[in-house]
Image (tube, rainbow, N blue to C red):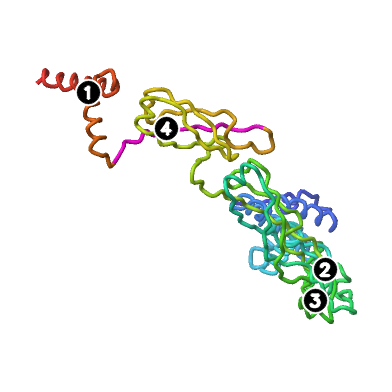
Amino acid sequence: MSKRDYYEILGVSKTASEAELKSAFRKLAMGCHPDRHPGDTAAEAKFKELNEAYQVLSDAQKRSAYDRYGHQAFEHGGGGQQGPEFSDFMSDIFDSFFGDARRGGPRSANGRERGADLRYNLEIGLEDAFSGKNASIRVPTSIACEVCSGSGAKPGSKSRQCPTCGGHGKVRANQGFFSVERTCPTCAGRGEIIDDPCKNCQGAGRVTRERTLSVNIPAGVEDGTRIRLAGEGEAGLRGGPAGDLYIFLSIQPHAIFQRDGADLFCRVPLGLTSAALGGEIEVPTLTGEQARVKVPEGTQTGKQFRLKGKGMSVLRSREFGDLYIQVVVETPQKLTARQRELLMEFERESSGATHPEAAGFFGRVKDFLGGIGGAA
């Protein structure tokens, strides 16, 4: 397959100046660089084609040979393929353009870097989640050095401007028609040099301490709720801004209540006679008060009673969920002789009317077994 004309590849005329060649190549190369199109073989091929064309046309001798003999001028080792130096050069260029995006953001000016965000896990009770509270926590973290006020320099001394980068933290190098900016190797991007570092923080500008903080936990929080304390994270380097502290809440299991969103569930055991005869029972609520529930005669296990507005508080509102009382009828154990006698007497006088579910179930079983026997 014949090669495309180099001028056509770059989209310029044969009389294009050096500046026009540079401008055309830069525009096209930025649009198809493999770093911007990972895995795109077409873009990679186009980028190589552009490199080859520009390597030839940007060199006066190669361009003259190409103008006279075309692609044949490079068929015996004189080609325009780029070497490793050119690849490194292009890598530096695209690191300069896109490096910050790859690394997650630019470095702070003068080396003053933002401190890291911190996480603190805090476990609270269901009562605290219901009513809210102010909690005190102790957090080990880095804070600005109190001796040097975060500067990193020994008290009475000052840092000096880096002579290599002039305080910018970065240096520029011209490579072809590109200007590449890199972190200053002398000051490591700080823009300044500390000749006499603070002995308390060894020049870092921060030290590790344990702090006591107050956390406001609003009513209605749920398991996994995150609370952000701005500026309470790790101190920044060399006077940079502090990060944030994130409090992650977990709620302890409760001995009486189970939570489902804003609703609460409470399983209440009910004696056999109370379930049969009916009456009233007292049940607890998260406010510490007792609520009365009327139990009708013949209440069965699984019966549920709803107490409206007696559940959890809803976050950032004045509403409350509901409390559901789930009844579990308890079979008596360790009976006395008299109790057994009474129950046996009750059993002899029982009928389908007193145990409608049992009568209905065993009636269906009898019909089912009768049907199988008849079919046989």
Q: Which element is circle 4 on?
A: strand
Q: Residue at x 65, y 55 (%)?
A: 34
Disc on the earlier residue, 2 or 1: 2
Residue that label 1 marks: 362
What's the mark number on residue 186?
3
Q: Amino acid at mark 3?
A: Thr
Q: Amino acid at mark 2?
A: Gly
Q: Residue at x 51, y 46 (%)?
A: 254
Disc 1 and disc 4: Cα gap in Å? 25 Å
Q: Are marks 3 and 1 in contact (CB under 8 Å)?
A: no
Disc 2 and disc 4: Cα gap in Å? 71 Å
Q: Residue at x 71, y 49 (%)?
A: 216
Q: Which element is circle 2 on?
A: loop
Disc on the earlier residue, 1 or 4: 4
- Left or right: where 308 falls relative to 105: left
Q: Is residue 52 visible?
A: no
Residue that label 2 marks: 169
Q: Amino acid at mark 1?
A: Phe
Disc 2 and disc 3: Cα gap in Å? 9 Å
Q: Are marks 2 and 4 in contact (CB under 8 Å)?
A: no
Number of the front mark, 1 or 4: 4
Q: Is residue 141 visible?
A: yes
Number of the front mark, 2 or 1: 1
- Of the pair 200 and 67, the residue shown nearer to us: 200
Give the magenta range: 319-333
Query: Could you tell me which quadrant the C terminus lies in?
Result: top left
Quarter of the figure with residue 86: bottom right
Q: Residue at x 49, y 42 (%)?
A: 256
